[in-house]
Amino acid sequence: MQDQFFDLPDLPLESGETLAGARVAYQTWGELNEERSNAVWVCHALTANADVLAWWPGLFGPDCHFDPADWFIVCANVLGSCYGSTGPVEADPVTGRPRYQQFPLLTIRDLVAAHEALRQELGLTDIHTLIGGSLGGQQALEWAVQRPELFDNLVVIATNARHSAWGIAFNEAQRLAIEADPTYAAGQPGGGSAGLRAARAVALLSYRSYPAYAETQTDPEDELLREHRASTYQRYQGDKLVARFDAYSYVALSRSMDTHHLGRGRGGVPAALAGIGARTLVLGITSDVLFPLSEQRELAAHIPGAMYAELDSRYGHDGFLLETAAITHFLELFYAPTFAH
């Protein structure tokens, strides 16, 4: 599936700045039914893209819970990314040069504003399910607060109502690693790649768990003194991200995540969550140290009538991408009373 593109007019940002010449890359699968009641919108996480069938296999795709034969599926690449939507390495239409580290701050509300503009362009007046995990869940919650009448069902996994001090600290540690790479400050193609490699190694510690590393990365040889399996794994994962992502986008989107606060200007988090009108499923992951279960329980406690469940997983935060069989099980329980397709 090829990306499609939607050009926005200049986008006013929550910070007071304006993002000139914004473009959103998106993909769709399936077709709307006659009643236009089968739309599913996916909000993606930090380093993903619009191709949800590629990065969420087992949940989206033929013979999966969200099968394009049954659903009209939309996934848009967030602004600030490097997968087709306007980001730091794209040319500024005013200057003709990439903005790199001068790219404006995008809040979660700004990312949602782009989704909303695309929704209107697509003519979708009712969305059956809005779903996202991690940063995607933050976008989904913000959008559901803004437009309570638009979504029939909301599914959020391993996310929160306000990005925590713990999460912001992890993000800042990663940004420090990138900023320590002198090529980042130079503002150039590929700038900050060595720093991004180190940042990914830091991030993995928040995405996985002690049991997962113990099971998969413990050295089988007792006499090993160097090149430990866990060390080479960190390097491998860093290299993998550098090959497919950009340091300037990583910094921009981690800062977007830090801005997430549903209660800002709305009388606090409980009041904001109380305004969500969608039937809601909140899923937490037992081993998630980045978005702990206490944050999922807060969501479920304040969203009217929310269903809450926990995924018992050793994979930590990344369980939202890997535990698709368990997620499917809870989706079937969630939909069973009211909907069959």
Image: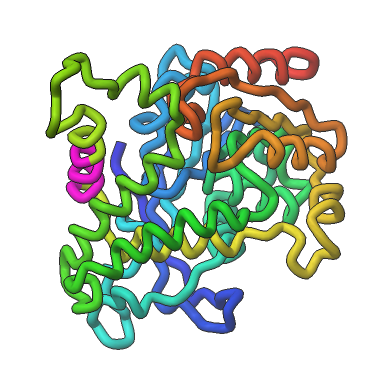
Reply above or below: 153 against 325.
below
| Residue that appears at 19% across and 73% down | 182
Q: Position of residue 191 (x, y in %)?
A: 19, 67
Q: Position of residue 302 (x, y in %)?
A: 84, 42
Q: Position of residue 192 (x, y in %)?
A: 22, 65
* Residue 68 makes an appearance in the image: no
Q: Quadrant of the C terminus?
A: top right
| Residue that appears at 51% across and 14% down | 325
Is 50 colored magenta in this rendering?
A: no
- For residue 238, side relative to residue 112 (left or right): left
Q: Which residues are magenta?
A: 235-243
Is 238 colored magenta in this rendering?
A: yes
Q: Quadrant of the N terminus?
A: top left
Q: Position of residue 339 (x, y in %)?
A: 73, 18
- Of 235 and 271, which appears nearest the observer? 235
Reply above or below: 187 against 247.
below
| Residue that appears at 47% across and 42% down | 75
> Chief secondary structure of the magenta span?
helix
- The quadrant in which residue 282 appears is top right
| Residue that appears at 55% across and 61% down | 258
Give the colour scheme shown.
Answer: rainbow
- For residue 218, side relative to residue 327 (left or right): left
- For residue 193, side relative to residue 167 (left or right): left
